[in-house]
């Protein structure tokens, strides 16, 4: 299956590949001729000249055939190099296309699918699996032609030299194949378990490196050493078993091959004695024997490589297929922005579970609310209460199943709005969001090609302008991956700047100001309020927070608990009507965050 | 890590060579621990190879016995040598297996020893090492690097020895068969060696570039995959894919370039091999011809058919290892640099040993004093500029201040994760350096912002750090931390294994488990480092009482975001830019109208 897909990627290069293959075949054939010529010299040229007593003719014959050998040698060299290079070219182009398709697919996967694959697994598919496939494509073109031709050609020539001897030799091949098959089958299983043991060991190291403070504080050094030593012992056991199993195959194969060789010698002796065979042929036979057995080794190697390659290709195809299984996105539907004053955003009886029909508790149940254009929605609730789920559904990160209520934006079911179009209207900043290695400007722009003025404006709104201005290189300041050279508050301000830079209709702040001190947070909120009143399209905001003060001025505040709305209204209304809200509020008032 | 790499690149070639030699010696030290096994291995290898080496000679003798041709084959000789060959091959195969058996043992033992050594060393390293090195790097030393050294030990060492024996042995055999024919190698061997050296030199940087480009591709992919949701939110998938294509093109090109130049090596080696074969055939044919036709031929040139055959076989054997020469060399090189990295880690200075006269802190009471403490993580940048703190026994001290002001640094010094530069830190009136680290640290229990749970049962995670806790103790602690009810909903209750891919528990719940862990401890000092920032306000409210219970009777040092936790503190220290700006109780500070008051009042705006 997977190999078929692989060939699909090779098809565009069919012509180049066939030319390369023909050259490779020619190169291999001339190489095959060498032992043949050798047997001509030793068996025909020399004895004939010796019998005739004509030394000169013998010398001439030897020189002639030697020159033939030289020609074959040189042409084999040239042909093989050309063919190898062509193979590398094809491998490169095919691998590039595969990797492109794979990455493109990972970007199109839905969040559900990403959760299922997990990011580390996608990562290893993108790197080691595509690397394996690249390697295999190259090797198959080189060895995949050479080895079978050497094998088949060698067998054909030996058959023509002496069929009986050839059959004697071939009798060992089934044994060899069987050995390879059994050993590698067992070996692969054992390697897998040793890999698991290795993962286990790495996991402990990772845990301990991350928890070193706790370990040192609790003086658990010796306990951890014991825990680790146990995992090493397990690994040693597993690796030893695997290696010992695998290393049995070489000696076994050598025994079979060499026994075949002895058999050829012995049967050859019988046949020479019977006058059915010349002694020089046996020398040639031994030559071919080495060639064939080497080819055998290569064929088994190719076999192993193909197994590995097809496993990798399978993992790649899984991702591509998953991405393709999603309905295609329609790009160019008109976005009918109505400017009515009615409800802008409506959740209508929304039920949702991340596990779909597979059971498990609902992550959201019967969530309904509506918000006018330009309004502000606050959502507050405990971890796991479903705050982020509301946003994920709105952004169509996860798809709301058909019979689970509706989400309307401007009166239109969002399931009918192409995701890209929907998302283009939204600016979002999440709590631990994504900053990448690049300048501050690039991180705010985020590939949208905004003007510098837009970016400065966004930074200013997000209260980031001050700290950016304080940097020596300002907007060109380099951020490390994940923004590790910025403080939590600085990161959040950049993320908010990114969110407002595209002048969105809807601004979502998902716990995005938790690391800001109260003063900055208040300034930010004031600035956003101003912005909404500045004319143009009013901005509808959704603020998810744990602090009451971040949401208390919202037009509508939802209090979520266990996926249900247990209170909704304005700050004042909720203080009256919702015990939980009041409780939170009381615990926080006078409980400012001082960071 | 990268820093070290750069340094290594800056060293001169001569220094590099001596450092490489030192690494090799150190590896030899590990091998020497298994010297008897190793000697056995060498003996076994010697036997296996020598036996295998005589085989072509005997098959040549068989051919000579066949040569007279029809009706006059010497079957007695043929039968004798064929039997001998069978024995030789079987014995040699058996010895080969025995050899790998021994080598697997040795290399596994050495690998396990290195792994343990590295891990033990890691546990002795100061916290600063972990703060300045990436987890991924550390893991790659203990897994990938040691794997590389290990593989090299089990394969390359023997392969070199085998190669040497094969080359020397088959050369000796060829010399004994025909010294003149052997002269062919005087031509072809130097060609192949020069070629191999020249080529590998040219190709090596290309392979290095290939892995570098692939690494860059990995880095980019990792970054983008982790930000996939944001990328979707901004609909910039196409731009990200375009940029990826750039990296992809680079990686594929680098691979191709290495391949393009590397692809010459294989065919060229085969070419040189075939060239030798051609020369041997030509000369061997001539000598064979003269041996028949010219009775006066000097004895040294005389050769018969069987020996031509044996010679050809030996020449193939002879060239095998020479073809592999370049491969082995590059493997050894990568193993040496892997070993170098492992040793560099092993050479990292450990936490300085406790002072010779350090005493065990017993019956700790929890009276902590810092006097004019100065400290910086690097020499150039001082973080704390003369800090004075006194936390009396059983009192609660809160430290507040903006990020980067030095709050966590205070904790690092109190627990001696780092040693202060000047000033005095006293625990129960004793200088910290006069106490053993272990006993000092066991006087603390803590709940940190980054919850740390390991893959193990809930029970093990709670009892971590407290020996001999009973089930009842654990349940009491869990109840006090308000996590008992949740634990009971887990499939196996307290025996549920917490792992990354198993039970899904929230950050807040993880935090509660670490609070339960702290509850269990009898340490007199409690450190809460922004402990409740992962718990939402409502849950925080619920555990607030529990925390008060936890604080009861303990000296507490609290670093917190939320004022609610610290309002009741006996003293609040406001840290700003490494100095204590103001201190007092909540009300005192509010009355004072300083920095604290301004932060506090901001929330009501």
Image: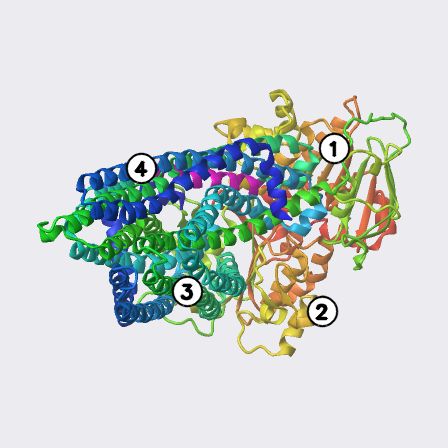
Expressed as whole percent of the image width and height from the top left, the position of residue B28 reads 27, 61
Boundaries of the magenta span: B202-223
**Residue position marked by numbered label 2 in the rendering:** B491
Q: Alpha carbon of mark 1 to alpha carbon of mark 3: how far?
A: 64 Å
> Which dot, 4 or 2, sits closer to the camera?
4
Q: Alpha carbon of mark 3 to alpha carbon of mark 4: how far?
A: 34 Å
Badge 4: how crowded within 10 Å, few (<14), some, or many (20+)?
some
Expressed as whole percent of the image width and height from the top left, the position of residue B248 reads 53, 35
Mark 4 / mark 1, whichever is N-terminal: 4
Question: Could you tell me which secondary element the residue under label 2 belongs to?
Answer: loop
Question: Could you tell me which secondary element the residue under label 3 belongs to?
Answer: helix
Instruction: Please state if B266 lies on the left or on the right of B468 as rendered.
Output: left
4 and 2 marks on the same chain: no
Q: Alpha carbon of mark 4 to alpha carbon of mark 2: how far?
A: 78 Å
> Which dot, 2 or 3, sits closer to the camera?
3
Q: Splitting the image into 4 quarters, where does residue B158 fall?
A: bottom left
**Residue position marked by numbered label 3 in the rendering:** A256
At 28% across and 54% down in the image, what residue appears?
A: B313
Badge 3: how crowded within 10 Å, few (<14), some, or many (20+)?
some
**Residue position marked by numbered label 4 in the rendering:** A68
Q: Alpha carbon of mark 4 to alpha carbon of mark 1: how far?
A: 68 Å
Instruction: Verify CB contact (< 8 Å) between mark 2 and mark 3.
Output: no
Expressed as whole percent of the image width and height from the top left, the position of residue A489 reads 60, 40
Q: Alpha carbon of mark 2 to alpha carbon of mark 3: how far?
A: 55 Å
In front here: A444 or B311?
A: B311
Residue B219 belongs to the span the image colors magenta: yes
> Which dot, 1 or 3, sits closer to the camera?
3
The main secondary structure of the magenta stretch is helix
Question: Could you tell me which secondary element the residue under label 4 belongs to?
Answer: helix
4 and 1 marks on the same chain: yes
Visible residue check, residue B426: yes
Expressed as whole percent of the image width and height from the top left, the position of residue B531 reads 61, 56
């Amino acid at each position: 299956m997977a190999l078929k897909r692989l060939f699909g990627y090779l098809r565009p290069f069919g012509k180049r590949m066939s030319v390369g293959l023909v050259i490779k075949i020619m190169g291999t054939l001339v190489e095959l001729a060498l032992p043949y010529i050798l047997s001509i010299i030793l068996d025909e040229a020399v004895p004939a000249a010796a019998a005739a007593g004509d030394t000169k003719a013998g010398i001439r014959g030897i020189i002639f055939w030697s020159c033939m050998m030289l020609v074959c040698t040189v042409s084999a060299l040239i042909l093989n190099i050309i063919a190898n290079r062509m193979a590398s070219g094809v491998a490169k182009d095919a691998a590039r296309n595969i990797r492109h398709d794979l990455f493109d697919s990972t970007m199109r996967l839905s969040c559900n699918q990403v959760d299922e694959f997990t990011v580390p697994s996608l990562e290893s598919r993108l790197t080691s699996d595509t690397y394996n496939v690249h390697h295999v494509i190259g090797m198959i073109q080189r060895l995949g032609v050479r080895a079978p031709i050497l094998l088949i050609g060698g067998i054909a020539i030996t058959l023509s030299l002496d069929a009986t001897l050839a059959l004697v030799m071939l009798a060992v091949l089934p044994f060899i194949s069987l050995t390879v098959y059994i050993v590698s089958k067992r070996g692969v299983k054992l390697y897998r378990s040793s890999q698991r043991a290795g993962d286990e060991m790495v996991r402990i190291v990772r845990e301990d490196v991350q928890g070193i403070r706790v370990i040192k504080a609790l003086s658990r050094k010796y306990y951890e050493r014991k825990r680790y030593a146990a995992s090493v012992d397990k690994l040693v056991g597993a690796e030893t078993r695997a290696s010992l199993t695998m290393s049995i195959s070489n000696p076994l194969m050598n025994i079979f091959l060499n026994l075949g060789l002895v058999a050829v010698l012995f049967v050859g002796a019988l046949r020479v004695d019977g006058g059915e065979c010349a002694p020089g042929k046996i020398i040639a036979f031994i030559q071919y024997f080495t060639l064939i057995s080497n080819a055998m080794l290569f064929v088994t190697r190719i076999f192993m490589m193909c197994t590995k390659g097809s496993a990798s290709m399978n993992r790649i195809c899984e991702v591509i297929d998953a991405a393709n299984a999603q309905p295609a996105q329609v790009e160019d539907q008109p976005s009918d922005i109505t400017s009515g004053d009615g409800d802008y955003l409506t959740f209508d009886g929304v039920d949702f579970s991340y596990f779909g029909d597979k059971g498990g508790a609902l992550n959201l149940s019967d969530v309904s609310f509506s918000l006018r254009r330009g309004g502000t929605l606050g959502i507050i609730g405990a971890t796991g209460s479903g705050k982020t789920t509301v946003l994920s559904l709105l952004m169509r990160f996860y798809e709301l199943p058909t019979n689970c209520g509706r989400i309307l934006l401007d009166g239109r079911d969002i399931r009918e709005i192409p995701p890209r179009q929907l998302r283009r209207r939204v600016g979002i900043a999440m709590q631990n969001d994504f900053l990448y290695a690049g300048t501050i400007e690039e991180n705010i722009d985020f590939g949208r090609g905004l003007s510098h003025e837009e970016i400065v404006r966004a930074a200013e709104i997000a209260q980031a302008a001050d700290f950016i201005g304080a940097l020596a290189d300002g907007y060109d300041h380099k951020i490390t991956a994940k923004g590790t050279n910025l403080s939590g508050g600085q990161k959040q301000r950049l993320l908010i700047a990114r969110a407002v830079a595209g002048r969105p209709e809807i601004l979502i702040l998902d716990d995005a100001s938790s690391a800001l001190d109260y003063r900055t947070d208040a300034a930010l909120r004031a600035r956003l309020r101003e912005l909404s009143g500045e004319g143009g399209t009013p901005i509808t905001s959704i603020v998810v927070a744990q602090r009451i003060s971040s949401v208390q001025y919202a037009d509508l505040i939802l209090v979520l608990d266990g996926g249900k709305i247990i209170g909704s209204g304005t700050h004042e209304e909720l203080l009256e009507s919702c015990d939980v809200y009041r409780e939170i509020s009381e615990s926080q008032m006078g409980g400012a965050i001082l960071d | 890590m990268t820093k070290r790499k750069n340094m290594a690149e800056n060293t001169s070639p001569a220094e590099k060579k001596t450092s490489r030699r030192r690494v090799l010696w150190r590896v030899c030290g590990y091998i020497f621990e298994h010297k008897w096994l190793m000697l056995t291995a060498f003996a076994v290898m010697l036997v296996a190879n020598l036996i295998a080496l005589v085989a072509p000679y005997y098959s040549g003798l068989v051919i000579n016995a066949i040569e007279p041709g029809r009706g006059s084959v010497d079957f007695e000789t043929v039968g004798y040598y064929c039997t001998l060959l069978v024995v030789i091959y079987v014995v040699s195969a058996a010895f080969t297996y025995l050899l790998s058996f021994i080598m697997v043992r040795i290399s596994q033992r050495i690998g396990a020893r290195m792994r343990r050594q590295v891990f033990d060393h890691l546990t002795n390293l100061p916290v600063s090492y972990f703060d300045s090195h990436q987890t991924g790097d550390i893991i790659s030393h203990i897994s990938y690097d040691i794997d590389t050294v290990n593989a090299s030990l089990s394969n390359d060492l023997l392969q070199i020895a085998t190669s040497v024996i094969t080359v020397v042995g088959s050369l000796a055999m060829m010399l004994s068969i025909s010294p003149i024919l052997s002269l062919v190698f005087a031509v072809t061997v130097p060609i192949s060696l020069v070629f191999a050296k020249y080529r590998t030199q040219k190709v090596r940087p290309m392979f290095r570039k290939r892995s570098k480009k692939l690494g860059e591709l990995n880095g980019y992919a990792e970054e983008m995959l982790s930000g996939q949701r944001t990328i979707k939110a901004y609909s910039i998938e196409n731009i990200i894919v375009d940029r990826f294509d750039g990296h992809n093109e680079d990686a594929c090109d680098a691979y191709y370039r290495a391949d393009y130049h590397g692809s010459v090596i294989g065919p060229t080696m085969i070419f040189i091999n075939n060239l030798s074969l051609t020369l041997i055939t030509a000369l061997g044919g001539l000598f064979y011809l003269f041996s028949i036709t010219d009775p006066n031929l000097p004895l040294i040139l005389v050769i018969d058919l069987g020996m031509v055959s044996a010679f050809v076989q030996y020449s193939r054997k002879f060239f095998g290892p020479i073809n592999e020469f370049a491969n082995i060399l590059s493997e050894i090189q990568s193993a040496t640099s892997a070993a170098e990295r492992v040793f560099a880690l092993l050479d990292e200075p450990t936490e300085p040993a406790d002072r010779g006269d350090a005493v065990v802190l017993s019956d700790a009471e929890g009276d902590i004093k810092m006097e004019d403490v100065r400290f910086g993580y690097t020499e150039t940048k001082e973080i704390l500029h003369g800090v004075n703190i006194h936390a009396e026994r059983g009192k609660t001290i809160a430290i507040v201040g903006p990020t980067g002001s030095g709050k966590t640094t205070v904790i690092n010094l109190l627990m001696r994760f780092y040693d202060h530069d000047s000033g005095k830190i006293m625990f129960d009136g004793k200088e910290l350096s006069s106490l053993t680290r272990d006993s000092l640290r066991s006087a603390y229990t803590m709940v940190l912002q980054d919850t740390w749970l390991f893959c193990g049962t809930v029970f093990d995670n709670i009892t971590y750090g407290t020996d001999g806790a009973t089930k009842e103790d654990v349940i009491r602690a869990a109840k006090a931390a308000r996590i008992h009810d949740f634990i009971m909903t887990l499939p196996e209750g307290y025996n549920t294994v917490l792992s990354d891919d198993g039970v899904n528990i929230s950050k807040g719940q993880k935090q509660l488990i670490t609070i339960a862990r702290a509850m269990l401890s009898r340490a007199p000092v409690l450190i809460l480092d922004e402990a409740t920032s992962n718990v939402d306000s409502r849950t925080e409210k619920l555990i607030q009482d529990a925390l008060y219970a936890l604080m009861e009777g303990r000296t507490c040092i609290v670093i917190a975001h939320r004022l609610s936790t610290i309002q009741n503190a006996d003293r609040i220290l406001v840290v700003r830019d490494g100095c204590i700006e103001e201190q007092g109780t909540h009300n005192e500070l509010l009355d004072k109208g300083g920095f604290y008051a301004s932060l506090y009042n901001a929330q009501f705006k």
